[in-house]
């Protein structure tokens, strides 16, 4: 048990207040929503904001009408 946990238990004993509240969940988009948005932006505009650094993600095209990958010009992150 860490010192912080001990202090928390002393300040707010669970016998009186119940178990500590679960950590608050993030309310932003899920990873799936973020990646889906990035892919559709890539398909629409041939570039999108890099999910890692916010830089410019450039679409790479195959034979089909949709991009097959994207590569960030700033940090080198690749979406495939
Ligand atoms: Zn990037």
Image: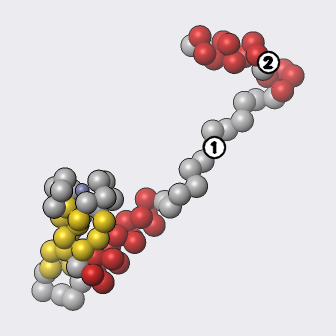
Residue 56 can be seen in this image? yes
Q: Is 73 left or right of 21, judged from the image as shown?
A: left
Q: Is 3 left or right of 56, judged from the image as shown?
A: right
Q: Is 7 left or right of 68, judged from the image as shown?
A: right
Q: Residue 60 appears at what percent x and percent y?
A: 15, 74
Residue 69 can be seen in this image? no
Q: Residue 61 appears at what percent x and percent y?
A: 15, 79
Of 14 and 74, which appears nearest the observer?
Answer: 74
Judging from the image, what secondary structure is the residue with disc 1 in?
loop
**Outermost residue toward the right in this view:** 16
Q: Are marks 1 and 2 in contact (CB under 8 Å)?
A: no
Judging from the image, what secondary structure is the residue with disc 2 in?
loop
Residue sitting at 19 percent across and 70 percent down? 58
- Residue highlighted by disc 1: 24
Pointer 1 or 2: first along the chain: 2
> Which mark, residue 55?
none
What distance separates the C-alpha of mark 1 from that of mark 2? 20 Å
Q: Residues within 10 Å of mark 1 (few under 14, many from 20)?
A: few
Answer above or below: position of 40 versus 57.
below
Residue sitting at 37 percent across and 65 percent down? 35
Residue sitting at 31 percent across and 58 percent down? 54
Identify the image quadrant of the C terminus.
bottom left
Answer above or below: position of 25 versus 36.
above
Identify the image quadrant of the N terminus.
top right
**Which quarter of the frame holds ligand 1?**
bottom left
Answer above or below: position of 66 versus 59.
below
| Res 74 quadrant in image | bottom left
> Which mark, residue 13?
2
Residue sitting at 18 percent across and 87 percent down? 64
Q: Residue 29 appears at what percent x and percent y?
A: 50, 61
């Amino acid at each position: 048990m860490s010192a912080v946990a001990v202090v928390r238990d002393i300040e707010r004993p669970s016998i009186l207040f119940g178990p500590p509240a679960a950590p608050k969940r993030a309310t932003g988009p899920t990873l799936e929503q973020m990646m889906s948005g990035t892919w559709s932006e890539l398909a629409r505009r041939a570039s999108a904001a890099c999910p890692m650094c916010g830089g410019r993600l450039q679409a790479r095209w195959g034979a089909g009408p949709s991009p097959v990958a994207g590569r960030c010009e700033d940090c080198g992150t690749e979406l495939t």
